[in-house]
Image (cartoon, grey):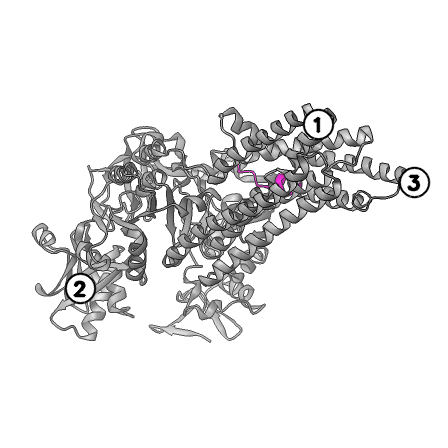
Amino acid sequence: MAIKIADQIQCAHCGEPCTTGKIDFNNKTFCCEGCRMVYEIINENGLCNYYDLNANPGITQRIRVREDKFAFLADENIASRLISFKNDQQTHVIFSIPQMHCSSCLYLLENLHRINKGVISSRVNFPEKTIEIFFDHSVLSLQSLAALLTSVGYEPYISLKDISSEKKKGDQNLIYQLGVAGFCFSNIMLMSFPEYLGVDAGEEQIRSVFRWANLLLSLPVFFYAAWPFYESSWKSLRHRFLNIDAPIALAVIITFVRSVWEVVSGTGGGYFDSMSGIVFFMLVGRVLQNRTFRQLSFERDYRSYFPVAVTVIEDGKQQSCLLPDLKVQDTILIHNEELIPVDGWIIKGNALIDYSFVTGESLPVEKRPGEMVYAGGRQTGGNIQLKVMKEVNQGYLTSLWNREHTAEEEKNRSFVHAVSRYFTMVVFGIALAAGVYWQFNDPSKIWISVTAVFIVACPCALLLSNSFTNGHILRILGRNGLYLRSSQVIEDIASVNHIVLDKTGTLTSSGQQNVSYEGEPLSRQTMRNIAALAACSNHPLSKSIVQYLGQAGDVQADGFKEVAGKGIEGYVNDTWIRLDAGSAEERETNKTTTVFLYIENRKLGCFYFTNQYRRFIPRLLKQLISRNKVSVISGDTAAEKERLHSMTGGKAALFFKQMPDDKLSYIQQQQEKGDHVMMIGDGLNDGAALLQSSVGLAVSDQSNNFTPASDGIIEAAQLERLPDFIQLCRNNRKIVTASFIMSVIYNVAGLYFAVQGVLSPLIAAILMPSSSLSIILLTYLSSYISARRMRLAF
């Protein structure tokens, strides 16, 4: 099936005209072999409705790659930091691919070898949005491989941080420890049945063999699997703080020592099953938590946003230069849609800088030769040349980032840590009292009673309730688009009573505007002519006009001229049309952004632009205001003040033209008043406030997109569920509290036997597993019911 536009056959994949010939396949026409191959790979197994999403889905897949875009990968020093393995025949490399989103993407990326013979094989890690590629470096270079991925729509994300720091280690060691603990625990339980059943004395030899076998199996648990608890406890003690891992580590050590003493002395079988069970269940809880957020990056610095290299112009020649190697007075070339990595003066070209990520201003700022531009902005016009004025680590974006981290202060510690501190003190008190009592009544029971107190009163039930509930809640939140960096954030959210919202990119949709027209009626042909002129510009307002009026079809503009910050003009169908931003007085008078329409020097009307709020924002604001204090703080102008006032019913504090330091100061002021503040934003200008707040959530249209450092990442589409997320976190605390009460009941029952020095292996074997299993069951069912009531994905 061939598609004709303006008497030209259009490629069924990329939508471009087949000017150099056409290739027919499966009743469709393609402009080149590459498009045909991609189409074949996507459709041969009947994957998702890739070609039903729009007329030419490949229009974003067929990308012409600038020749020097990945020139920095030819540098062996850079390439070696990205390559995971290399020998004489092949090279292995792992790239981050944030764009992959469905099974079609996965299948296409795992069939790169069919598009380019230099690729041996490729393997996708879909949850982490990465691809590992094995390629023949004698046929395909690393630079060409990156260009290949970009040409099919999956540009690898390579930042300065990727080549500046070591790769983050995963939780593989924790998995190994869990496996060891699980294996030993199950076998120790199996070989402890003679102790549970009380075998006859005549079978003492068999029981002795099982006891020594249990001792051997407990060694890997004690010395390897339980290591995270020892390490955490030691770190907390060095800082003069008793965290929740300290009593569990103490219980493991005392249980192990007591058990070894019983086996060696022949007085009993010990409590190796209880010790290994504690370690195993605690590790399960930690693994559940880690799996929820291990693929997300919450700790980012300025290097995460900067490119690896830039184009330097020297003696009229362009060459790639690593960002750290840039020097003051170097001349660099910035292309359209590229991030400005340094502060500098414009020496050639007119700039239209999008500073929304840094300042929150929604519209690009015009800059001319001789003016200063700052790092962090994105050029949205043509190419410009800059003279470097400051090195990378001294620029505005870097200083802004550094100010963020000076604002960070220690978050509230978990209430479980506070409980554990008092819990441990009480246990020590009971053990001391039992020891003193038996010292005067029966000294032979001192060792038995004191160690039994620590074994039975181990806070494993409290730990399990906290770990399993938090792990379960983290998983539920993650499935519903809220990814938290740690379980501590759940407790912080539960304490929030003041919510501060950024406007641009949080309440409003990034890059989208509502457009309206007032003036003389426009015919359909006139609308197409205006759209044809606007389509020649890359300015966001011009793009919004095209979306509002509709595509121009085959209408073309002649003599197009654009003056940055002023407007555009040109001839369309022999008619002179001008879209004008208006004079400074007119822009000051209008409360909203405006563009005036002139045809043949006669003013016909005006286009009005307002921020496009996400559809659910009015309802969301009402729900949040009914339960919390709410503030809206923005770096944008006050043009939307009346509209926001109407949405909030005048019950929210509204602030505009706020710089990053202003946002930080506001958060600090509210905290000084005793408020627990949640800050929700999307740009680096929100970063300092996000870190200062009790809870900082970064809004992202894609969880793998750029986001400032934060306590959590919330998908923009799921922002409307924020009230439910907050309530679920508050329910989490109630669940943990209830399970803690249940664990106290078990401990009291166990202590009744322990202080008397009559704790038998059978009683210990019943109390420890039953308390742990009942706690797991209680927390799982309670969190499940809570999520179901809120209709959250489970």
Using the numbered discs, state the Cα–Cα distance from disc 2 to disc 1 in whole angstroms.
98 Å
Give the SS element for disc 2: strand
Select label 2 or label 1 by which is in front: 1
Q: Earlier in the sequence, mark 3 or mark 1?
A: 3
Taking the spot 41% from the left edge, 62% from the top edge, the residue there is 59
Identify the magenta region: 166-176
Q: What residue did someone put label 1 on? A: 447
In magenta segment, residue 556 = no
Mark 2, other Cα within 10 Å: few <14 / some 14–19 / many ≥20: many
Q: What residue did someone put label 3 on? A: 202
Q: What numbered label is drawn on residue 571?
A: 2
Q: 19 or 216: which is nearer to us?
A: 216
Residue 141 quadrant: top right
Give the SS element for disc 3: helix
Using the numbered discs, state the Cα–Cα distance from disc 3 to disc 2 in whole angstroms.
108 Å
Task: Specify the amino acid type for callout 3.
Answer: Gly
Q: 348 or 266: which is nearer to us?
A: 266
Mark 3, other Cα within 10 Å: few <14 / some 14–19 / many ≥20: few
Q: Earlier in the sequence, mark 2 or mark 1?
A: 1
Horizontal and vertical percent position of residue 616: 32, 62
